[in-house]
Image (spheres, rainbow, N blue to C red):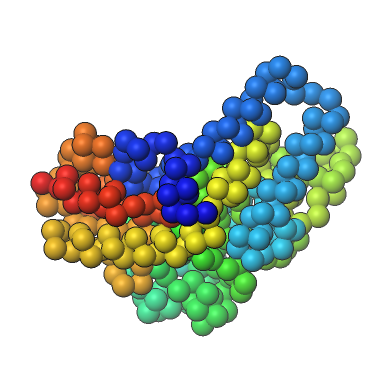
Amino acid sequence: MTFEEARAQFPVLDRIAYLNAGTFGPVPRGVHDALVQALDRDFEAGRSGMPYFEETMELRTEARSRVAGLVHADPLQVALTASTTDACNIVVAGLGLTAEDEIVTTSAEHFGLLGALSISPARVVVADPEPDAILAAVTPRTRLLALSQVLWTTGRVLPVLELREQTGIPVLVDGAQSVGAIPVSFAGLDFLTISGQKWLCGPDSTGALVVAEPDRLRIASPSYFAQASYELDGTFEPRPGAARFEPNWWSAASLRGFLAALDARPEWAFDHAADVAERCRVVLSSRVELATPEERATLVAFRAPGDPAELVAQLYEQGVHVRETPKTGLVRVSCGWWTSDGDLERLVAALP
Ligand SMILES: Cc1ncc(COP(=O)(O)O)c(C=O)c1O
């Protein structure tokens, strides 16, 4: 697939310099078509009968297996969720921590992770998002490191595997800004969350949780997917693998759309995204103060010359879609495998 062919999958790019996959990725034509066709089928043929149910369950199996392939995990380690937020809640609630325990996190996490931590009885220790500060925050009571692999604010990459290895403490990796944007391997990690709607360009409300040892995590919130069989008193035999944590049904449309999103990705997706993010840093550096360090992924953040929300609104008016990150004074540019130099030129030209 050439770059032009890849980009032509996104009609929205003809009009908009779409630099906001950190929130929602652009929708490829294949995803659109899969969603519409599946919805038409539900509309015309109904959503019932064993063949319908079995086919949808087979699509789930395929989706788990494709996610596993993406992050080098085993399909049995993958649960389909609706979001990273779901995945964080499943892990933190499932660990069954007590007030004697501590969780180390950073001051640059998204509420999708922080919300789950905030309702854990464990003490949450907040470190600066620096490897040394994270290591210094670990005590004999630490039961979990809860960290983003790519910070949603500055785009900085945290060395999650090294931190896991140096501390020996299980790590919950918030992969919302890493999976689909940079190569991610689950090897050596304990829990990894995935958002389908961002860098994977999948449908809304799609995501996944990868769990190294599913049968060692408690099922804190059983859905129908938790059980292989159950009794009328509510006791149940969990499904094998991480599927036991799955919180919700995905429509056949969502499943087909998600698989189409993975099909839309060119082989060179990571290389192009890394290159174009670097070019973005370079072109912005002469105009604004960059906040993205060298250990960066595909987000590039800069300090807004004035009010960040106003600047984002002004850029939006000119067809340049970026976002500000709250409480940071930063504006964030998301560079994906579909981003062109022309998009970057439009961004720079639209700056005040
Ligand atoms: C680092 C990070 N974590 C979690 C989330 C929440 O993701 P989701 O909507 O999939 O729960 C986001 C979304 O922007 C994010 O950037």
| Residue found 29% across the figure and 48% down from its top | 343
Inspect this view and state whether residue 195 appears: no
Nearer to us in this view, 316 or 138? 316
For residue 139, above or below residue 325: below
Q: How many marks?
A: 0
For residue 154, above or below residue 64: below
Q: Is residue 202 left or right of residue 305?
A: right
Q: Looking at this view, name the residue that lies furthest to the top.
A: 44
For residue 104, above or below residue 1: below
Q: Quadrant of residue 130?
A: bottom left
| Residue found 13% across the figure and 58% down from its top | 287
Q: Is residue 190 left or right of residue 244?
A: left
For residue 68, above or below residue 226: below
Residue 15 at x, y percent in the picture: 32, 35
| Residue found 37% across the figure and 40% down from its top | 13
Residue 16 at x, y percent in the picture: 31, 38
Nearer to us in this view, 90 or 149? 149
Q: Quadrant of residue 240?
A: bottom right
Nearer to us in this view, 308 or 26? 26
Residue 253 at x, y percent in the picture: 64, 32
Q: Is residue 274 left or right of residue 179?
A: left
Inspect this view and state whether residue 270 appears: yes
Residue 280 at x, y percent in the picture: 27, 59
